[in-house]
Amino acid sequence: MNSIAPIEMIKHIDALPALPEHYLAIKKVIASPEYEMSALVRAIRPNQTVSATILKCVNSTFFNPVGAPIADISKAIARLGLRQTERLALTSALMDDFGTPTSKIKTRTFWAHAYAVALICEQSATALHLNPEEMFSTGLFHDIGHLIQAIICDASFFEDGESCMSDAERHAAEIEHCGISHAELGAALLQQWNLPESLCQAVAAHHDVDSDILPARLCHMADNESLQIIGHETAFSAIESLIKERFTPCISEVLSRYGLSSS
Ligand SMILES: [Fe+2]
Ligand SMILES: [Fe+2]
């Protein structure tokens, strides 16, 4: 149906979203050589969604089982830890500015899935000698092509039960409805956003079980495993604890089941 290269197709989409400002602002703070907690607090506070997500998580039974409610971002960071706060801040900044063009629930479900895949990717990265931060971003952005598909073709395809399809059935349906897979579209968008080439390649191949790109196969594993752990109704604040309970203790077993090794 379509013979245009993904990057060319992306260039012709008028309503192409930009990488959200809040995400970039938080990334910039984290990458700064003078990075300290007070700078992260200043970057988080102006954004209601980011602040609310962090406070909701820190007051969940996992992080605050019996303590008094925490209503201050600095105290929340002290309780969650810096890296955990960064992950939540980056994910919720995307969730706020870059939702699906469908219902609120779908937006939450989309980013909850992305966050779970990102956490599994990050946790498994070290065992495979991959960069944990880049693997977190790979997981977070792996399905971003679905959002572009919803812009360029009938959004009802996105609303329908595509999660019940096999990889091959979904790929065929995407080609039929949109002319291109979400994996290729996502990778093209991430290229436009100037994200690392290695990340773009992993996203492009995240449904290719035979890919020779290790981050792509890791992302595929995380995609599958997250679906066993996170349901459609799982609260965002419960994802971290569910991954720690149900995935972290069996990382090596899962990696070997998928034939994933660094050699
Ligand atoms: Fe996908
Ligand atoms: Fe996915």
Image (cartoon, grey):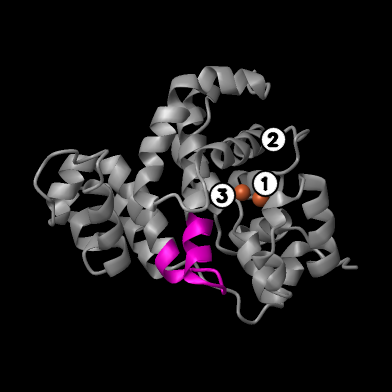
Q: Say what amino acid the circle numbered 2 marks.
A: Ile
**Secondary element at tag 1:** helix
Count neighbours of disc 2 (C-alpha within 10 A) and say few if under 14, some if 14 to 19, many if 20 or more. some
Mark toward the viewer: 3 or 2:
2
Q: Which residue is mark 1?
A: 201
Q: Which residue is mark 3?
A: 196
Between disc 3 and disc 2, whose residue precedes?
Answer: 3
Residue 4 x, y percent position in the rendering: 84, 67
Tell me which segment is drawn in magenta: 95-111
Confirm whether residue 3 shows in the render. Answer: yes
Foreground residue, 231 or 122? 231
Work out how far the residue at label 1 is from the one at label 3, CA to CA, in angstroms: 9 Å
Evaluate if marks 2 and 1 touch, with contact meaning CB atoms under 8 Å apart.
yes
**Secondary element at tag 2:** loop
| Mark carried by residue 213 | 2
Q: Quadrant of residue 27?
A: bottom left
